[in-house]
Image: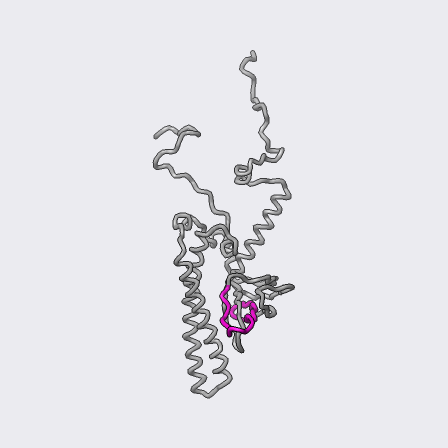
Amino acid sequence: MMPPRHPYAPPGPNSAIPKSRPNYTKLDLIKYDTPHLGPRIQLMLSQLEFKLNVEKQYLKGIEKMVQLYQMEGDRKSRADAAGRRIESTQKIQILKQALKRYEDLHIDMESAADAPDDDSINTPNMRKPLTGQLSIRILAVKDVDHASTSRFARGPETFVAVKVEDNVVARTKTSRVDKWEAESHSINVDKANEIELTVYDKPSDHPLPIGLLWIRISDIVEEMRRKRIEAEINNSGWVSADRMGDGGMSPPQQFAIPSQPTQFGVPPQAV
């Protein structure tokens, strides 16, 4: 067996240096100003591919319903299904465009591979359907491609719909400037996994989706839990090891290293 290396000796060629675990969640990755671009791209590629496959299956079901209602002569149900078919077709187009955009971006696979699986961060009960009240405030949308209108017409009216398990539970007023004021909503959630925010343009009688966002409710719960823990740590005076190392912060007084080393036992010169 080789003797242990000196604490300051360089590591051997086969020595593995442990990497610090990235301190972010999936909720951090979907935020507009996230600095974690590599993991964000990887997450979005996975999510968009999954949502695209789901929407394609949904469209097939809607098309069968349209044919069935047409055979039965049910005009009202057929018109409703036809409207959902138009919306689903537009969603598929949006998902394909977004997927193509992310596929064209460069991704650092090495850093992305180090990204933690969010399921390993969340506790098991947070991955189950959750029940409770969710408060949401919608401020603005950005970088969306609006539906085309006639040359001299005003921009289309835009609104945001909040869906839980594919049911609309809240929606904003219409806006032509992509911003809203006093758009706060309290939503009762009953055994749900995620919420969907769909941005619609209303160039005609049928609203068209122009933007989609999915947020897993357990990610929101995890974010709130982390912020609560951080607040408790800050109020108690504790400082994390990475903050001490990066910012040159000194430890709390009760853990400060004394200027003179503490001696134990009888000094060597004592008789």
Say which quadrant the C terminus sits in.
top right
The residue located at (52%, 40%) in the rendering is 242
Residue situated in front as seen by the camera: 37 or 260 = 37
User: With respect to residue 235, does 93 lie above or below?
Assistant: below
Q: Main secondary structure of the magenta part?
A: loop
Residue 35 in view: yes
**Within the magenta stretch, is there residue 258?**
no
Residue situated in front as seen by the camera: 157 or 118 = 157
The residue located at (53%, 64%) in the rendering is 195
Where is residue 40 drawn, in percent x and y?
A: 46, 54
The number of callouts visible is 0
Q: What range is drawn magenta here?
A: 144-167
Residue 170 in view: no
User: With respect to residue 254, does 195 lie above or below?
Assistant: below
Direction front: furthest residue: 152
**Within the magenta stretch, is there residue 147?**
yes
Say which quadrant the N terminus sits in.
top left
Q: Which colour assignment does the render follow?
A: one colour
**Which quadrant of the figure has residue 251?**
top right
Where is residue 60 drawn, in percent x and y?
A: 41, 75
Where is residue 221 drawn, in percent x and y?
A: 56, 56
234 vs 66, left or right, is right
254 vs 125, left or right, is right
Residue situated in front as seen by the camera: 260 or 197 = 197
172 vs 51, left or right, is right
Direction bottom: furthest residue: 73
The residue located at (46%, 72%) in the rendering is 88
Where is residue 102 drawn, in percent x and y?
A: 42, 58
User: With respect to residue 2, does 19 lie above or below?
Assistant: below
